[in-house]
Image (spheres, helix red, strand yellow):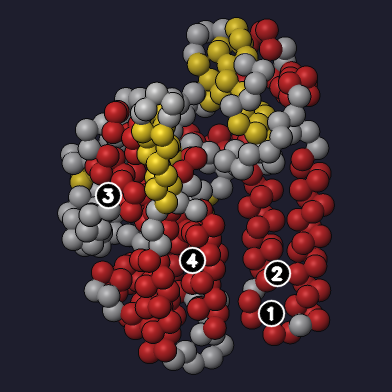
Amino acid sequence: KCLDSTEPLPWKTIKTVIEKEIGPLSKTFSSVDQTPLASASIAQVHAAKLKTGEDVVIKVQKPRIDESLKADLSFIYVASKVLEFLQPDWERTSLSAIAGDIRSSMLEELDFEKEATNIEEFRLFLQENELNRKATAPRVYRDFTTKKVLTMERLRGVSLLDEESISKIVDDPEATIITALNVWTQSVSSMPWFHADVHAGNLLVLDDGRVGFIDFGIVGRVSEKTFKAVNELSTALALQDFEGMAIALCNMGATDEEVDTKKFGRDIERVLQNLNQVQPDVTIASYADGSVAGSIDFDENEVTTILLEIVDVTEDNGLKLPREFGLLVKQSLYFDRYLKILAPELDVVGDTRVSGLGSAPTIGGGIEDESVIDV
């Protein structure tokens, strides 16, 4: 994931990977920027221009990263099984199952052809639901894409956390974050999978005002059982019915014992109170010319901490929740942070513009959405 900055590899090394995968650069590209736009543990990204004139980015997998990851992740999985054997109480935490899920997810990220398919399916979803005027994902250039090289349209925009820049692009930043939330929510309810990595580096407000979704390496899939339970959870959340939320989670998870839903509800209420206390960080900077600028951000570690609290509460009450629920909740926590920054006064439950249960809200104020999930 290219949000996680790492030391970039030399251009010579990256060029070798590209040319091994798709042939000489001079045959395909009129120019390639040797300085990467981003570099992460798995890949780094370079801007380029095709011979046909289109601006693109090339996502290039770092050499031998597949071998290294397979070895490291397999070790973690085996170690988790050993720990569960030595400490039987730890088996309740699903440690090895979590390690196995992480292994599968990370290895899937290594196949850029799968990511290309995800992008194309998301673009089709936008087209079929007439959402192209509100959101987009980059066009994939299949002729120049392999398992280790992904060539796609370059989307130009700013992070969803850059409130000042967003205000210069659109008149209503609040409507923009509502659009992003509604598009993602509708994709959850109508696609076989959902974008499971909507951190601020993967959601852009483009120069034309649309929301750009990028980086489809991590996706989640929701079973019918989980989807039904999430709808029940959403209803209980809207009513602030914490015991009802506990019952919904019980319907979703696996348990070998009787769950005290009243106690579970009280635990959930405590976690949600902690969530409401999280506030974005505001930074003010002054410059030599006397100008002042501000930025708003949040610590992504807080999102992970809250998610772990939810996991702890469910496991303490004797439940094992499916992995896809954790992925759904984490994305919802990201959106919660964005709403606190761009729409702090928004009533998510009461505002008819926001996708919700039993309603037909609009996306960006003009497109009907029959989505029924709002986590």
Q: Which mark is residue 96?
A: 2
**Label 1, label 3: how far apart the Cα atoms are:** 42 Å
**In the image, is residue 121 above or below residue 20?**
below
Residue depicted at 48% across the width and 47% down the height = 199
For the point 38% across and 66% down, the residue is: 277
Q: Residues within 10 Å of mark 1 (few under 14, many from 20)?
A: some
Residue 12 falls in image quadrant: top right
Residue closest to the eye, 293 or 243: 293
Q: Which residue is mark 1?
A: 91
* Dot placed on the residue nearer the N-terminal end, 3 or 4: 4
Give the residue at mark 4: 306
- Element type where label 1 sits in the image: helix
Q: Quadrant of the C terminus?
A: bottom left
In the rendering, which numbered label is found on residue 220? none
Looking at the rendered image, the disc whose residue lies closer to the viewer, 1 or 4, is 4
Residue 173 in sight from this viewpoint: yes
Alpha-carbon span between mark 4 and mark 2 = 21 Å
Name the residue located 42 percent from the left edge and 74 percent from the top edge: 271
Residue type beneath disc 3: Ala
Disc 4 residue type (three-letter)? Ile
Which is nearer the N-term, disc 3 or disc 2? 2
Q: Circle 3 is placed at which residue position?
A: 343
Spatial CA span between label 3 and label 2? 39 Å
- Say which label, 1 or 2, has the lower sequence index: 1
Name the element at disc 3: loop
Per the image, label 2 sits on a secondary structure element best described as helix
- Tell me if label 1 and label 2 are in contact, CB under 8 Å: yes
Report, in whole angstroms, how far the alpha carbon at label 3 lies from the one at label 4.
21 Å
Q: Residues within 10 Å of mark 2 (few under 14, many from 20)?
A: many
Asked if the residue under mark 4 is in contact with the one under mark 1, i.e. CB atoms within 8 Å, the reply is: no
